[in-house]
Amino acid sequence: MIKQPINRTKKDIIVLGSGTSILELSEDEREYINQCEVVIAINKFMAFYEKAKIIPTHIFYVDAYEWSVVLFLKHIFKVCRKNNLKNLTFIIGKKILKKYITKQRLEDNIFLYFLKKIYLQLKYKFNKTDNLNLFLVPRQSHFEFVSHQNWINQNNNWSDSLEKPLFHYRGSLTTVLNYISIKYPNRPIKLVGTDFYGSEYFFQQELDQLNINWEDWSTSITQQEGKHFSAISYQGTTMFDKLDYIIDNLRQSGNDIYCCNPKSLLVTNGYIDYKPIYQK
């Protein structure tokens, strides 16, 4: 089991995607990432952090719009508790707070009750017979609940506050970058595992073996096209359509952005400059 780093002194903001290039990282690169003060894992990454040998500090899980997505978040909580991870920051979409808690089994009811209690300060008493180990979050966790705009709206605006809906366009990465511009201005951003080529995660084998319904409406499209959904033309759009706008806004907040995989579509298509994770 990987030990959770104690002293994180590097100022780079690391954003972790789930592309297969994660498996190509050297031990030195992994060690450098684990020394960074802010390491943000997007979506499912956290459930398989041990395979990556990287321990994030933040888990960005905003697109909880389907029950399969909500249930996978619960699985992430279980993994973190089992491995005794502490002081993680979970960035979760406010939509999860609007999920009904009366149409699911007791386990899911209590899970949502617990999240709502964190955010809304609900006074809810558990019965003595409830097995709370099934639902509780990792110890000393921190929570931030955010919302984002609808990507279908072509007039999405870059947000200057977490109290406002964050920018979102065809993928979680766009929203993560808006979050970083607000929370961590004037810091370099390095994208790791943000490949956008291929339809599989670096943890695809382990994912397929889980007894969890993890698929959502975009899964079949991704598998058919053989690349990340954000890079697939859908309703005449791709995430790349807004990258110039995103980079311009990051410049205004003092955030230089680089991609650490030279084969990433972000680099090969000329949108973001390549830069190694660290320089010897």
Image (cartoon, grey):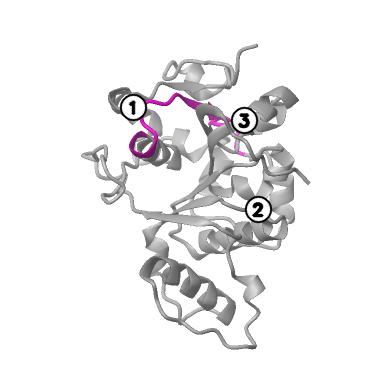
Q: How far apart are labels 1 and 2 at the CA level? A: 31 Å
Numbered range of the magenta stretch: 181-199
Hey, which residue is sitting farthest bottom in the picture? Answer: 128
Query: Secondary structure beneath disc 3?
Result: helix
The tag on residue 85 is 2
Seen in the image, is 208 located left or right of residue 64? right
Q: Residue furthest left?
A: 155
Could you tell me which residue is drawn at 57 percent across and 30 percent down? 9
Q: CA distance from mark 3 to mark 1?
A: 21 Å
Name the residue tied to disc 1: 250
- Secondary element at image label 2: loop
Residue for point 48% across, 21% down: 258
Q: Which one is in front, 114 or 266?
A: 114
Q: Quadrant of residue 107?
A: bottom right
Q: Quadrant of the C terminus?
A: top right
In the shown orientation, is residue 87 left or right of residue 60? right
Asked if disc 1 and disc 2 are in contact, CB closer than 8 Å, the reply is no
Give the main secondary structure, helix, strand or loop, of the magenta stretch.
Answer: loop
Between tags 1 and 2, which lies in front?
A: 2
Q: Amino acid at mark 2?
A: Leu
Q: Which mark is residue 33?
A: 3
Amino acid under label 1? Leu
Hey, what amino acid is under mark 3?
A: Ile
